[in-house]
Amino acid sequence: MNIAVLQFPGSNCDQDAFHLFASGLGLPTRYVWHKDTRLGDADLVVVPGGFSYGDYLRCGAIARFSPVMGAVREHAERGGLVLGICNGFQILCEAGLLPGALIRNSSLEYRCMTCDLAVEEAGPAFNTRLLGKRVRMPIGHGEGNFRIDDAGLERLESNHQVILRYIDNPNGSLASIAGIRNEEGNVFGMMPHPDRAFERFHPSRDGLAVARAVLSLRFPEILKESA
Amino acid sequence: MKRADLPPNPDPVLNQPITPALIKKHGLLPDEYEQIRLHLGGDPTLTELGIFSVMWSEHCSYKNTRPLLKGFPTEKRGATESFGRVLVKAGEENAGIIDVGDGWAIAFKIESHNHPSAIEPFEGAATGVGGIIRDIFTMGARPVLLTNSLRFGELDSPVTKRLLRGVVAGIAHYGNCVGVPTVAGDVYFDRSYEGNPLVNALCLGTLRHDQIRLGKATGLGNPVYYVGAATGRDGLGGAAFASKELSAESSSDRPAVQKGDPFMEKLLIEACLEMMAVPGLVVGIQDMGAAGLTCSTCETASRGGAGIEIELDQVPQREVGMNSYEIMLSESQERMLVIVQKGREREIEEVFAKWDLHAAHVGTVTDTGRMVVRQHGVVVADIPASALTDNAPVYQREARRPAYLDETSRWTPTGSGLPDIDLAVATAVLPKLLCLPTIASKRWIYRQYDHMVQHGTVVLPGSDAGVVRLRLGSSEKFIAIKNDCNGRYCYLNPRRGALIAMVECLRNLVCSGATPLAMTDNLNFGNPYKPENFYQLKECVAGLAEACRFFDVPVVGGNVSLYNESPEGAIDPTPTVSVVGFIEKEAHVTRQFARSPGSRIVLLGGAPHELGGSQFLGAIHGKKTGDAPEVDLEAEKRLQDFLLAQIRSGRIRAAHDLSEGGLLVALSEMLFGPGQIGAHVDLRAFGALRLDALLFGESQGRVLVEVEPDHLSPLLADAGAAGVVADAIGSFLATETLSVGTGLGTLEWTTAVLRAGWETSIESAMRRPGIG
């Protein structure tokens, strides 16, 4: 099970994501520079948080054109796992790998805080056995207000593509959506940070279980290992 | 007299004669101009005049404060071969560096951006953060945390609201984007800062000893590179602008405020650290902060005992037709000057190409000791580098004790006939104090800062000090950081106020389980040419120096910001201190929040008994008077040593220092943690004291601790043996009330009500209709 963490100019949670998988889960993890066009033997591609390209124009709007994104798209089309966290979620939406868009928080302010989240039944693609009904993870974003048209929302809900919802909506997201998956169940995006919820002193260690849930369909053995 | 050694410049603007009016406009005194002529052997060119004006400004030269700063201890007496040594001292470089063991070190420094923030709060604060981050990574350190220290006028004014909103958004914009967590801060609101807010930003970075890089130009013939963003006309003469008072016309100085690009800074951090990791490639490096290209070239040359020649046509420019004066004085952000080992030009160029950044070969190191600048083939400046740095003027200003001190220092509550409070008033005062913006929760502010990126934040903002886990190679270490300064105390007693700033900061660190290691200071004062202001400055520096020596906490760097005045007068003297402490084990990390109902409450240090300078006097009686609270350094040391030992022995579940608002505010704050908890304390044993001073006075050297019942007697016994006053005053309870027994009867509040006011006070003041 190999993990690749992308690095765009302006990524700043790349090391957090790296340590979630490398130190937290003990998995072989490496960085992939945005100018690379190959992902190697990666099983899971993590698109980390930050301000890729300064979030100029629109969050994620420039990063989607980075050379590496072609390889990410091919990887996803072959059924490979992809997880976008925060800015990574925004990039995946801009790249069309996930539906919807993330706009400015309704408060018009950046929000860094810890949120309680309801874990949704999202089918075998996101096995929630280790998660339970609720998790707690930090958020840190100015543009996490999830938006999608009515038909899109209907599709998300009927396909059980919503994986996490805020208990107390911090940003105005439609239907309190905090994280989703694609229809096929191999591409995930979430605004909360599992990469800030895995150390002893973090507000929770739920990030480990969230990361396991993402890997669970392809690598069922990950659910057996103890945290 | 024209200089014989320089040709006339074909550009008539640059060739204009230097008139007394022009000299005055550059903030130079006639006598200083004469010194310039002596250094040059004749009249300067316009470019040279500009260069001298910024380098001899207070901001760059410390000309009015350098003699005072010599009183600070710069080394740690208790340092060992493997811990606590000051590796780079204050004033030597862009930031001081201190050894934290195992071959690792930390670099940290605080710096002000007060004037730019007054004029343009968002950009002013943002570029303040950018500037201090560059001071850290230029030393070779990776920035791992930020803190800030802010002062504003009272929050009921629309101007303050605009400034607060802008400053916080600016800090958030920059810090969040570069990915360095803002883990702690302090914010005070007081009329004296109206129109002249203080924005002090601190950055701390980590590095191995062998990664330390200095701002020195050495090695004849070594190439000089300019890396980072292109130069524009923004921030022209910002250092000179920072060295004068704000006036009604200051908004016309807006071009002197720089514009920041945190994305560019993030790239610059990564590219520079990557470049510095190449063995032997970088000879010297310095950021272009205040006075930009000017300061970085003459300082590196002067430190290296060398000369430097630069060719401005090679400088990346984002505007057409900039002349040498503009290029040399521009304070465009996100630029660095790098001196590279000759013959290895391609290596630096490759690193910067990877990050899509400029790396322009703009000059060469010489052995002339002179800074020579050319543009379009003409020499526009030729100055001995030391004339701009080591040989800048130094003044001993006149100090005069301000007259108001005669009145305030003699004031006592009894002498002035101030009636004590009764139960009804006391009941009303506590919620009121908790809602004062200076005391209330700063959540509205810190939730806009990314305080968790880099996943090392252990104690989040809102407790006594920020605590961060440092990942140093394969090992990890824990540090605590805290800023402090109550300007009101410094106004009422400058020397003691500064002492308090230090001892309270140290006490906060100890409450968090940390041993204080080193400090950086930001001296924010008024115009030093006014003898009363200079008195405050001199006394405050003496107070800080005394505390630093007493507690063996060396000063590893700092910043001076003078001329903090608005038309209404000078700010309260504000010598902000920021101290870094070391926590031996993660288990010693202690927070201010009470954890278990049934545990006991112990007050260390005795009952508070003073009212001078308190928030209570200000908010309830409208007075800023009295003497600052007393400080007993020996008692303070006994208290801090005792508390740290108790924390390490595992007896302390929570600890919180008494500060603004006194005993009941501190006790309330202990209840405002993650859980629901109440408390009852009985203060009848302190009966003879004034109730207002007991409940709300701000006597120093007091700490409230939470102790499990089993640990109470040994703790009290140890306190007795250590010579620390300790009183078991009550218990934490599973109720939702705070009750206090006094000689007049029992006071009671509902904690949820107290908490709601405290938590939402600033938020409510800042709410914008229709948004949320």
Image: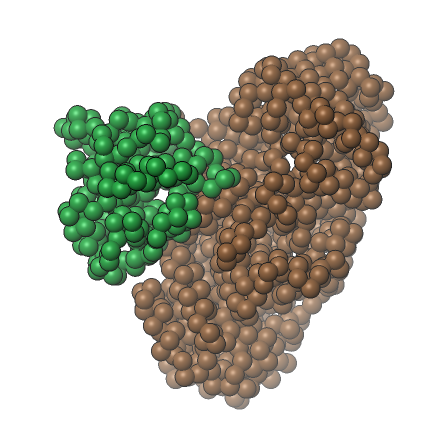
In the image, B99: left or right of A227? right
Q: Quadrant of the C terminus of chain B?
A: top left
User: Compared to A59, does B88 lie above or below?
Assistant: below
Give residue B450's quadrant in the image.
Answer: top left
The tint of chain B in the picture is brown
Query: From this viewpoint, is residue B206 visible?
Result: yes
Residue A121: percent from left, percent from top:
26, 26
Q: Taking B160 as reference, is B392 left or right?
A: right
Q: Nearer the viewer, residue B120 or B14?
A: B120
Q: Which residue is at a point 70% across and 38% down the rendered structure image? A: B649
Q: Position of residue B283 (x, y in %)?
A: 50, 76
Q: Is residue A140 visible?
A: no
Towards the viewer: B169 or B331: B169
Could you tell me which quadrant the N terminus of chain B lies in? bottom right
Q: Where residue B683 appears, x then y in whole percent?
A: 77, 19
Chain that is coloured green in the picture: A
Quarter of the image where one finds residue B716: top right
